[in-house]
Image (spheres, rainbow, N blue to C red):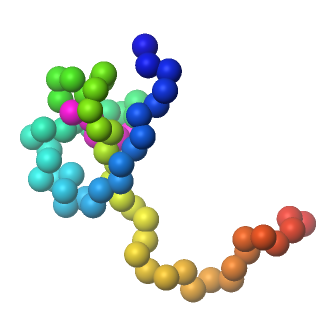
Amino acid sequence: MRTVRRPRRYIAGHWLILLRPVFRHSSSRDAYILRLIGSRRGPVLRADRRSRRPFEGVERRGTPAL
């Protein structure tokens, strides 16, 4: 069994739809892996849910916790 996790690669949701015949969703990984050999080899893909909009809130990094 593999002890080093394969890095997750974040891709746009429309690519996941196009790659659906080749990839399957793994519930345990919460990611998409290659069919047939994905449990051992190949990329591990996740949907890119990060926002492209600039953050407009208050900057809180670097402030002491209360």
View extreme (top): residue: 1
Dividing the picture into quadrants, the one containing residue 34 is top left
Image quadrant holding the N terminus, namely top left
Q: In the rendered view, would you say 14 is above or below 53? A: above
Which range of residues does the magenta coloring cover?
30-34
- Give the percent coordinates (x, y) of residue 41: 28, 26
- Give the percent coordinates (x, y) of residue 21: 9, 40
Dividing the picture into quadrants, the one containing residue 42 is top left
Taking the spot 36% from the left edge, 33% from the top edge, the residue there is: 27
- Give the percent coordinates (x, y) of residue 9: 36, 48
- Give the percent coordinates (x, y) of residue 44: 32, 39
View extreme (bottom): residue: 56
Is 58 in the magenta? no
Dividing the picture into quadrants, the one containing residue 37 is top left
Direction from residue 33 to residue 10 in the image, left or right: right
Taking the spot 78% from the left edge, 70% from the top edge, the residue there is: 62
Q: How many discs appear?
A: 0
Most common secondary structure along the magenta stretch: strand
User: Could you say which is closer to the camera, residue 66 or residue 52?
Assistant: 52
Image quadrant holding the C terminus, namely bottom right
Taking the spot 43% from the left edge, 71% from the top edge, the residue there is: 51
